[in-house]
Image (cartoon, rainbow, N blue to C red):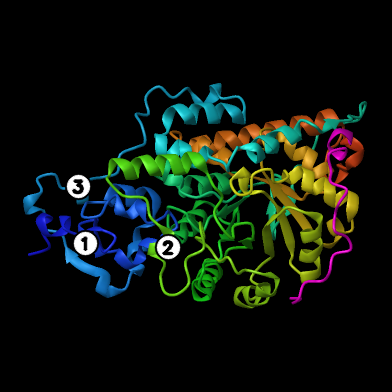
């Protein structure tokens, strides 16, 4: 006989929080303040069944990592006529009414369609940005400040879009950027992204917080087609070093071609739409707002919004590199200044990834295309020392071409692919890549180039954006304390 409903329901507070997941009862009391989504996201389900919410967000085996003494036993459903523990997850919304994929003609169409299809929670998670949303807006606006300078009367019937991205020979100068919780948009989640990457032979950088187990993504990509596509691994460095090393070793075991270390997330940005929804859900569930002063574990209070390591520094790259054991390129994601780009080059990383996290971290942070222009103006030698990738605000294949003209190796898209899989699954991802391919090829031909290595600053006019660059850069930059 398992634990019955009457017993489980008693444990619904900070002092004792039990939840039911997939027909089993777990004690999550000591884990509350360490959950990346905040304690309230668990407390809402204190004494209740959390299976549906859990399966939308977590890989199946996540709960198994709890200490065995926190596995309290089977749930007895005899008092509960509605066996929610075994009920399948429902899709975000009714899929009827989605427009035919062929009628979606640009990446923006996916956004507007996803907004109508997704649940409120999913839409807010995918679309939210920090504070006043200025970085999010700047990301898109800055691409419009770069204009083309086409050349004509050149033969452009045959062109090549091939390039090398993080140790992979890619068919296009684009990759699927890391974004979490794809199951919020489609039941197959990240598998849709892996399948699309394989079909088009481009890299997919999976998130630490993928809602499908990393091993399942790797298996999917390996069985689809041999030697097409590539799996990269994005690492949020956890608070504890052991956890970080465990994730890096997992990436090695799965033969990920590159390790992409996120460095702009010492704390989580203030995403007000996310916070507002959580606050409403907490209020509806009768959960009192947490007081950090009373929830501190041990003698040191937790770092506000500190879901990841807030002590990560340049010298930590040494043990990260050693644990990765040169299994592929080591890439730093979240570089937002020429100074840090120079430090990265001095530290000996293989590549840098310019990003402001889709405007979700520091509001009023520079767009990645502006940071790339800053690098080209103040320290162009970096572009010959290491590969430079970027993401943020990309809405057209022509944006990709602009970045390549300034020296970027390739461009990542994150939100776009979350929107494209929402409701449509793998077919939506395929359609989004097809649109990018069309727009990149068309832009190249109209510019008068037939290969990516022909692109250069001569094909663009950056005078508007150049006038907005800061002149107060801190050069020369001191060397980092530990070189790899």
Residue 421 belongs to the span the image colors magenta: no
Q: Is residue 333 left or right of residue 220?
A: right
Task: Please tell me whether mark 3 or mark 1 is closer to you in this view.
Answer: 1
The magenta region covers: 463-484
- For image coordinates 50% across by 76% down, the residue present is 242
Q: Nearer the viewer, residue 426 or 358?
A: 358
In the picture of the structure, the residue carrying the numbered disc 1 is 25
Disc number at residue 84? 3
Give the mark nearest the N terminus, 1 or 2.
Answer: 1
Estimate the x, y position of residue 466 in percent, counting from the top left.
Answer: 87, 39
Task: Please tell me whether mark 1 or mark 2 is closer to you in this view.
Answer: 2
Give the mark nearest the N terminus, 2 or 3.
Answer: 3
Estimate the x, y position of residue 110 in percent, counting from the top left.
Answer: 54, 30
Q: Main secondary structure of the magenta part?
A: loop
Mark 1, Cα crowd under 10 Å, few <14 / some 14-19 / many 20+, is: many
Q: Is 444 situated above or below 350?
A: above
Quick check: marks 1 and 2 in contact, CB under 8 Å? no
Give the mark nearest the N terminus, 3 or 1.
Answer: 1
Q: Is residue 47 left or right of residue 217?
A: left
Q: Is 15 situated above or below 471?
A: below
Q: Nearer the viewer, residue 229 or 146?
A: 146
Q: For the C terminus, which image quadrant?
A: bottom right
Q: Disc 2 to disc 3, how far (Cα)?
A: 36 Å
Estimate the x, y position of residue 415 in percent, counting from the top left.
Answer: 56, 41
Q: Is 236 situated above or below 357?
A: below
Residue 467 belongs to the span the image colors magenta: yes
Disc number at residue 293? 2
Q: Is residue 202 left or right of residue 69?
A: right
Q: Secondary structure at mark 3?
A: helix
């Amino acid at each position: 006989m398992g634990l019955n409903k009457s017993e489980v329901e008693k444990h619904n507070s900070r002092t004792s929080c039990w939840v039911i997941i997939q027909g089993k009862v777990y004690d999550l009391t000591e884990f509350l303040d360490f959950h990346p989504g905040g304690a309230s996201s668990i407390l809402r389900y204190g004494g209740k069944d959390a299976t549906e919410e859990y399966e939308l967000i977590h890989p199946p085996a996540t709960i198994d990592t709890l200490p065995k003494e926190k596995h309290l036993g089977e749930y007895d459903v005899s008092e509960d006529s509605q066996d929610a523990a075994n009920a399948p997850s429902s899709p975000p919304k009714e899929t009827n009414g989605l427009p035919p994929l062929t009628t979606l003609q640009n990446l923006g169409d996916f956004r507007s369609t996803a907004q109508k299809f997704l649940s409120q929670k999913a839409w807010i998670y995918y679309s939210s940005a920090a504070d006043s949303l200025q970085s999010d807006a700047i990301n898109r606006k800055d691409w419009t400040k770069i204009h083309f300078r086409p050349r004509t009367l050149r033969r452009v019937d045959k062109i090549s879009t091939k390039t090398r991205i993080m140790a992979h020979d890619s068919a296009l100068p684009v990759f699927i950027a890391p974004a979490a919780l794809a199951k919020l948009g489609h039941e197959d989640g990240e598998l849709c992204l892996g399948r699309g990457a394989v079909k088009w032979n481009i890299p997919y950088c999976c998130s630490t917080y993928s809602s499908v187990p990393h091993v399942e993504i790797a298996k999917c990509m390996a069985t689809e087609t041999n030697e097409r596509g590539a799996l990269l691994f994005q690492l949020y460095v956890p608070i504890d070093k052991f956890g970080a090393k465990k994730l890096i070793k997992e990436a090695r075991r799965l033969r990920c071609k590159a390790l992409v270390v996120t460095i702009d997330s010492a704390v989580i940005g203030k995403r007000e739409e996310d916070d507002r929804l959580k606050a409403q859900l907490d209020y509806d569930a009768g959960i009192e707002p947490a007081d950090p002063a009373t929830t501190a574990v041990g003698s040191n209070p937790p770092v506000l919004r500190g879901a990841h390591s807030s002590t990560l520094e340049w010298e930590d790259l040494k043990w990260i590199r050693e644990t990765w054991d040169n299994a592929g390129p080591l890439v730093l994601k979240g570089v937002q200044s020429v100074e840090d780009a120079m430090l990265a080059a001095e530290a000996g990383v293989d590549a840098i990834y310019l990003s402001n996290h889709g405007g979700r971290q520091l509001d009023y942070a520079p767009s990645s295309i502006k940071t790339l222009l800053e690098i080209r103006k103040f320290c162009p030698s970096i572009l010959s020392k290491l590969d430079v990738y970027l993401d943020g605000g990309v809405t057209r294949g022509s944006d990709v071409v602009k970045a390549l003209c300034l020296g970027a190796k390739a461009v990542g898209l994150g939100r776009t692919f979350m929107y494209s899989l929402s409701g449509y699954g793998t077919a939506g991802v395929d359609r989004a890549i097809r649109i990018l391919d069309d727009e990149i090829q068309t832009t190249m031909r109209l510019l008068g180039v037939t290969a990516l290595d022909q692109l250069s600053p001569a094909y663009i006019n950056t005078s508007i954006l150049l006038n907005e660059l800061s002149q107060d850069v801190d050069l020369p930059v001191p060397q980092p304390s530990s070189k790899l």
